Amino acid sequence: MKLNVTFLLFVFIASLGFSSSTKGEDLVVSVAEPYVDFRTGPASEYPIFHVAEQGESITILKKKTGWYKARTVKGQEGWVSAEQLGKTLKLSGELLYVPTGSFEDYANRTFEFSVFGGVLENVTAMSMATAWNWTGNLVAEATYTQALGNFSENKLWSLRLQHHIFPEWIVSPYLTIGAGSINTRPRSNLVQSGDEVRKSDFYEVGAGLRYYFARNIVVKFEYRNMIALTDRDDQERIEEFRLGFSVFF
Amino acid sequence: MKFDDLVFNNNFYKSIYKGLIQQRKIANKAMMSAVVILSTGLLNAPALAQPSIQENAEQPPALIDPNIERREIDESDIDTEDFEIGIFGGFISIEDFESSSVVGASIAYHINENLFLEARYAQATAGQTSFELLSGGAPFLTEEERDYTYYNLSLGYNINGETFFTDNLVFNSDVYFTVGAGSTDFGGDERFTISVGAGYRLLLTDFWALKVDVRDHVFTSDIIGVEKDVHNLALTLSTTFFF
């Protein structure tokens, strides 16, 4: 308990550090389109309170999701959409590059974070995964799954390599191979001793389908078949189906 | 005919006049250089020896240098604030086991202006059941088993808005709803837990927010003998920072 309080304190101090370590030099752009809308908040629901005209230079202060906080020469501050800011020019005269989560950005992604819900041998399972886009075709991934059933608690982690056969397709199939480890603990009311945790390594093969949904969201459906190398005479075969989505950076 | 014309039509008078003007110009220059020499002499004695003082006085250095070096700033230098980290505290009502205080930490990633992903970890210590209190008999759980910890991963949806305290005191705010799944470690078991909730986020600055959050954690439990779905409601206050 005490250790966790210090951990919370650490989180708090770290967050203060994060928020204060911001300002560098400001990026100044000039409006190339007839006008740019300034909103009171970083969402399309917020009202427009000011308009910067063509040729006016604005300073970009920060970014929050698809919105940029900008300041006019007169000192008015508001939020500009990524779509509108993508049509402004830098001081060098070239177009400002603003990622809007297009299919092109999807192809050039580096990191990806995924969340899944699924079924592992008739038990509800939830998983998360972090992936690194190595080449366009090869993706390295670390995944963690937990399946808490009525008879046992299962926790699995694995390292996997995905091969995307046609990465340029909007609906794209892929194959995976990997290796990992599984921890199984029977429910405390079933086993009195309580510490009968079984740990075994496993190998897995699988296949999946990913669909580029919109902006920076991808929907995924996966199947994997694992072979656990147990201490007993037979090897255990485990199957998992899962559906989830991922966001990419 | 005016008097001026009479005078200046005459070339003789013209030349005299020009001479006078030239003399005055020379006198002015001499006076100026004298002042410059004197002042520079007073301020900087060795400068007197330099012969080019008069030239310097006539061509003062440009105040604005038009060839300022502009540092090229890249798009990647823009400060992005899509992550939200925070701590929270409040109360949790643990079904059959009284209510107690809860503390925890959260991290969220804002996918777009409406959707966000949030991971939460929290801990509390469960109290005693009514039966334990009234009968005064043997406790159901050991001290260690009374430690109640949970984590979950939720998908949230923001309804963006503004909060007007007065005409001039206005903050951006949002009401959000979350649906998530995770696990609860209590009574010696870990249980798959569904959590649903709603909250209000008040953005005091662009990067600092206060949140009030109500969340229900539902899981199947057989701790008191019969298997049933338990609802553990948590009411928390958080402070979060965007980075």
Image: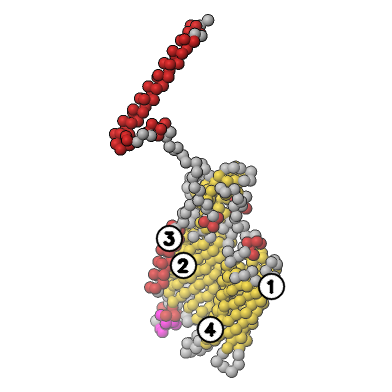
- Mark carried by residue A16: 3
Tell me the colour scheme of the image.
secondary structure
The residue shown at (39%, 73%) is A3
Sequence-earlier tag: 4 or 1: 1
Label 3, secondary structure: give it: helix
Disc 2 is attached to a residue of which chain? B
Compared with residue A169, is residue A178 higher up or lower down, i.e. above or below?
A: below
Please tell me how crowded label 1 is: few (under 14), some (14-19), or many (20+) other residues with Cα within 10 Å: some
Give the chain of mark 4. Answer: A
Frontmost of labels 4 and 1 is 1
Label 1 is found on which chain of the structure?
A
Residues indicated by labels 2 and 3 sit on the same polypeptide chain: no
- Magenta stretch containing residue B141, yes or no? yes
Gap between marks 4 and 1, in whole Å?
32 Å
- Magenta residues span B137-143
* Image side of residue B129 versus residue B113, left or right: left
Amino acid beneath label 3: Leu
Residues at marks 3 and 1, CA–CA distance in whole angstroms: 44 Å
Q: Which residue is mark 2?
A: B105
Q: Which residue is mark 4?
A: A183
Q: Secondary structure at mark 1?
A: loop
